[in-house]
């Protein structure tokens, strides 16, 4: 049965690292409305978004291209840390980037607490990689988290999703000075076994091979889908004790038990 005007098709996809990029507003809108980041781009004819944090410590750029790293974050030096950067490929799921950015903007973030980006992966049976750089490989063999350098001189982090040895899907880069708790937030989101939902079709993947990707489509009330982002903005606004500028009441993401197709 096709969706009605009151419903929308929602695809629940796993594994989440092959779900496609998703809606960039999941990141940019909460940064602007809930976290006080300022929109800096003064050329409306260019397909890009530039957001600066309060105090101008960090700048996030979204610059779509044919491929490569669409998202780049540059952070200025602090008293105890040199400048650092992070970047994410076009097909990096926005939920993973959101985990990183939510940790960065959390006023209660405990940067000084011990943090191991590998720990959440080990808890989900990731195995050691085979190669020159130490790291871990996801159970499906299509996702790798590695850190260059040595134990005494650690380097940058790389997270790579593939659909086989010669079919890269996306890559995330973290400068060696990137705070460990932010990388941990990214890998924690990465290790979550729950599927992610998408309303856009096609999903912009290199393949939808059913041997690799599981997709279940259901019809969900349109109001739930429309309010999911608003609920995210409201939740992040509460961390800063600032009212959200979005007038739509908050809501949970689309329910998993909505009417199936």
Image: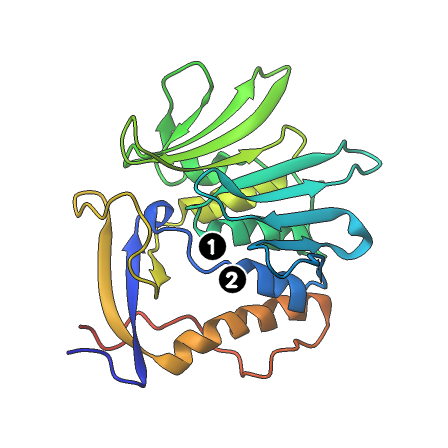
Determine which quarter of the picture holds residue 81. top right
Compare residues 94 and 63 and report the one nearer the observer. 63
Q: Quadrant of the N terminus?
A: bottom left
**Is residue 35 shown left or right of residue 247?**
right
SS at mark 2?
Answer: helix
> Which one is closest to the eye, mark 2 or mark 1?
2
224 is higher (above) or lower (below) than 72: below
Which circle marks residue 81 in the picture? none
Determine which quarter of the picture holds residue 261. bottom left
Q: Earlier in the sequence, mark 2 or mark 1?
A: 2
Q: Does any portion of residue 180 appear in the rendered image?
A: no
128 is higher (above) or lower (below) than 172: above
Is disc 2 in contact with disc 1, using a CB cutoff of under 8 Å? yes
25 is higher (above) or lower (below) than 83: below
Which circle marks residue 95 in the picture? 1
Determine which quarter of the picture holds residue 10. bottom left
Residue drawn at 23 percent across, 57 percent down:
215
Residue drawn at 35 percent across, 62 percent down:
198
Q: Residue 202: x and y, percent?
A: 28, 57
Instruction: Give how far apart the Cα atoms at labels 2 and 1 are.
Output: 8 Å
Q: Residues within 10 Å of mark 2 (few under 14, many from 20)?
A: some
Residue wearing tag 2: 26
Q: Residues within 10 Å of mark 1 (few under 14, many from 20)?
A: many
Q: Residue 149: x and y, percent?
A: 57, 17
Q: Does any portion of residue 172 appear in the rendered image?
A: yes
Residue drawn at 29 percent across, 26 percent down:
165
**Is residue 136 shown left or right of residue 47?**
left
């Amino acid at each position: 049965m096709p969706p009605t005007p009151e419903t929308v098709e929602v695809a629940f996809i796993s594994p989440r690292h092959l779900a496609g990029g998703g809606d960039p507003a999941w990141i940019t809108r909460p940064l602007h409305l809930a976290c006080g980041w300022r929109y800096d781009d003064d050329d409306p004819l260019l397909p890009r978004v530039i957001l600066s944090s309060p105090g101008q410590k960090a700048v996030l750029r979204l610059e779509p291209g044919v491929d490569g790293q669409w998202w780049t974050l540059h952070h200025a030096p602090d008293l105890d840390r040199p400048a650092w950067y992070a970047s994410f490929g076009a097909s990096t799921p926005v939920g993973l980037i959101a985990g990183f950015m939510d940790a960065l903007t959390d006023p209660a973030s405990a940067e000084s607490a011990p943090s191991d980006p590998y720990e959440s992966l080990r808890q989900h049976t990731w195995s050691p990689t085979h190669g020159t750089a130490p790291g871990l490989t996801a159970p499906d063999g299509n996702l790798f988290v590695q850190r260059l350098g040595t134990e005494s001189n650690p380097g940058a982090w790389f997270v790579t999703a593939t659909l086989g040895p010669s079919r890269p899907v996306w890559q995330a880069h973290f400068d060696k000075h990137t705070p460990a708790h932010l990388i941990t937030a990214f890998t924690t989101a990465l290790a979550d076994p729950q599927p992610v939902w998408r309303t856009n079709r096609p999903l912009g993947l290199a393949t939808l091979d059913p041997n690799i990707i599981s997709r279940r489509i259901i019809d969900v009330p349109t109001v739930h889908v429309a309010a999911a982002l608003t609920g995210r903005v409201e939740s992040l606004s509460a961390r800063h004790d600032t009212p959200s500028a979005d007038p739509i009441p908050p809501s949970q993401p689309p329910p998993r038990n909505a009417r199936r197709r």
